[in-house]
Amino acid sequence: MRTAIFPGSFDPFTLGHLDVLNSALKLFDKVVVAVGYNSSKSGFFTPEQRVEMIKEATAGMENVEVCSFKGLTVDFCKKKGACCIVRGLRTTTDFELESVVSQANKKMAPEISSIFIPSSHEYSFISSTVVRDVLINGGDAKCFLPKGINLDKYLKK
């Protein structure tokens, strides 16, 4: 079984992320969406909330596992028996950053490949940062998020 890890902070999980996940599912038998704990970021939503949101967004999707992890992505890949790391790209800036990270990962774990999947054009402008900004300023961000996510239960009113 060819398993890939789709790691990220997913703060929150957007339509762009779902688009990349759907593309990855065409390439791999199983995709693990892995919410990473980043000690340098506090996060708008807790990692537990992000995992729950992604589970809501992917309910009914076969061959998708959602979990969180700490530490290096390549170590998590080894733990899960994954052959690849999936990274979504929106812009050339994303590619430049992801290229550097993939080279470091390749040096640490040559057996694990990185796969870059561009988001569809209609989602290329959506970023978690934009969605958080909309939410912080009291806007309605539902148009940027997968339908299954019940955002109201995560927002403090």
Image (cartoon, grey):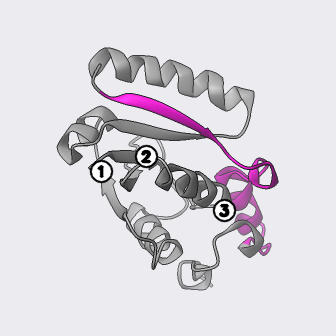
Residue found at x 57% / y 78%: 149
Q: Residue at x 41, y 44 (%)?
A: 38
Q: Quadrant of residue 122?
A: bottom right
Region rendered in magenta: 112-141
Q: Is residue 109 magenta?
A: no
Q: Which amino acid, mark 2?
A: Pro
Q: Which amino acid type corresponds to the residue marked 1 in the rendered image?
A: Phe
Residue 119 included in the magenta stretch of the image: yes
Query: Which label sits on residue 7?
Result: 2
| Residue 115 vertical position relative to residue 127 in the rendered view, above or below | above
Query: Which residue occupies the foreground of this view, 120 or 133?
Result: 120
Q: Residues within 10 Å of mark 1 (few under 14, many from 20)?
A: some
Residue 111 position, x and y percent, is 27, 24
Query: Circle 2 — which element?
Result: strand
**Left/right of residue 89 with respect to residue 25 in the rendered view:** right
Q: Is residue 70 left or right of residue 8?
A: left
Task: Choose the circle earlier in sequence order: 1 or 2.
Answer: 2
How crowded pointer 2 is (Cα within 10 Å; few <14, some 14-19, many 20+) is rated as many
Task: Check residue 15 in the rendering and tell me which mark sits there, or answer none.
Answer: 3
Numbered disc in front, either 1 or 2? 2
